[in-house]
Amino acid sequence: MKIIKSEENGRTVLAVEGWLDTPSSGELMEAVEAVENAKSLVLDFNGVEYICSSGLRAVLRGYQKMQKMGGDFSVVGVRAEVMDVFRLTGFDKDLNIAAREEKE
């Protein structure tokens, strides 16, 4: 897994690529914990091919952190397979999650 961090005007974007599984979810958790003084946190999931329960926990941690900081949280560019997991777990009802627009 690979995480690319960018910051601009109080907005932190973590672009995640690869599998968000048990071994790699700790990396995302660390990246989320390192976010400071952000008005919003965006997880860019355009490159995420798979997510497991540990990955979901890291996403939830990002949401909780931004709630405490009074900021906005979103997950964008979610592939259909990963979006299915968010729907099955109900994450799509409570979190701001946007599916990736699939090309025809």
Image (tube, grey):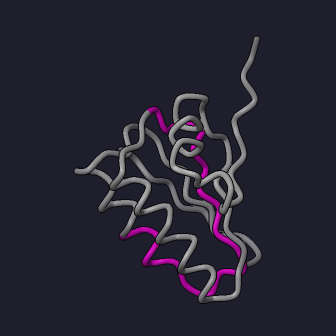
Task: Kindly give the residue lying farthest to the left in the view shown.
Answer: 23
Tell me how many marks there are: 0
Left or right, 55 with respect to 6, comes to left
* Residue 36 against residue 13 in the figure, above or below: below
Residue 22 appears at what percent x and percent y?
Answer: 26, 50
Viewer-nearest residue: 1 or 73:
73
Name the spot of residue 87 as percent of width and height, x first.
Answer: 59, 43
Span highlighted in magenta in the image: 30-49
Q: Residue at x 52, y 70 (%)?
A: 62
Residue for point 72% across, 23% down? 102
Name the residue rendered at 68%, 51% in the picture.
97
Height in image: 25 above or below 71? above
Location of the C terminus by quadrant is top right
User: Horizontally, is 69 left or right of 50 in the view?
Assistant: right
Residue 41: say if magenta.
Answer: yes
Q: Position of residue 19 (x, y in %)?
A: 37, 39
User: Residue 51, position in %: x, y?
Assistant: 41, 42
Name the image quarter holding the N terminus.
top left
Name above or below for residue 65 compared with residue 100: below
Q: Residue furthest top?
A: 104
Lateral position of residue 75 relative to residue 102, left or right? left
* Residue at 77% from the left image edge and 76% from the top image edge: 9
Q: Is residue 7 magenta?
A: no
